[in-house]
Image (tube, grey):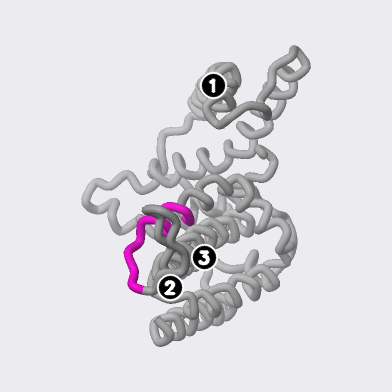
Amino acid sequence: MLKDITLGQYYPVKSFVHDLDPRIKIVLTIAFIVAVFLGGSLLGAIPITLFILLAARAANLPVKLLLKGIKPLRLILVFTFLLNLFFTAGDTVLLAVWKVRVTLEGLQTACRFSLRLVFLVTGASILTLTTQPVVLTDGMERLMRPLARIGFPAHELAMMMSIALRFIPTLLEEADKIMKAQMARGADFESGNLLQRAKAMVPLLVPLFVSAFRRAGDLAMAMEARCYHGGQGRTRLRVLKITRKDYIACAAVAALIAVTAVIG
């Protein structure tokens, strides 16, 4: 399950999406989220699905890789679907058993909210899979730079977010090693009900938190040893430039928002 988490990981290939300016990709991801919430019907999910498939194609990302990132959300998706299915009022009754009523409106709402969750995770995964953490940091810092005039710590916030994304794969690998070591000593993480499996994760979380704090301390000492004092006066290895590809991507996302708003 831990290996199925793709958020925060980078997929190193050459593609149209990889070459986009990180600032544009961040803004377009936010615009994509707006398009997802503009789709108020199941019909509105069709252009969003097509856009995700085209974006994955343009990024040279296997569709299996995107679907793999959804697997850890199975329980949340099932819970969201059932919650909206049984607790959404409606007039068209499809099934009635005792006090439980399933309506057509509830089924549509359940499908719509579940698809929204899938779209949000997939859109965020495309952003992180096609953008290196360092480049993503530069993009976020440049976008938040105007806020520095009012004392907003743009560089520090961008650095923290970049470090958090960078250490997701590292912590997942560390968790996998700890889990395998404890399974070799007789620990069972897969059998039992949901509560028992949650209790079984406690021996995994304690050493994982200890390892995370140790890595944070080592990183802080390494940054201090290299005389890191924030973003003031720092130069950039990569100069961010908006190219023709960025304008094409903006036009594609604008078309998606327009189509989604019309369909509803």
Residue at x 51% of width, y 39% of height: 164
Circle 1 is placed at which residue position?
199
- The magenta region covers 81-91
Residue type marked 1: Lys
Residue at x 64% of width, y 34% of height: 172
Above or below, 102 against 185 in this view is below
Q: Quadrant of the C terminus?
A: bottom left
Residue at x 78% of width, y 17% of height: 184
Above or below, 228 against 113 in this view is above
Residue at x 58% of width, y 68% of height: 20
Q: Secondary structure at mark 3?
A: helix
Circle 2 is placed at which residue position?
35
Residue type marked 3: Lys
Circle 3 is placed at which residue position?
25
Relative to the observer, which residue lies in front, 203 or 74? 74
* Residue 90 is inside the magenta segment: yes
Q: Quadrant of the N terminus?
A: top right
Alpha carbon separation for disc pair 2 and 3: 15 Å
Image side of residue 261 versus residue 51, left or right: left
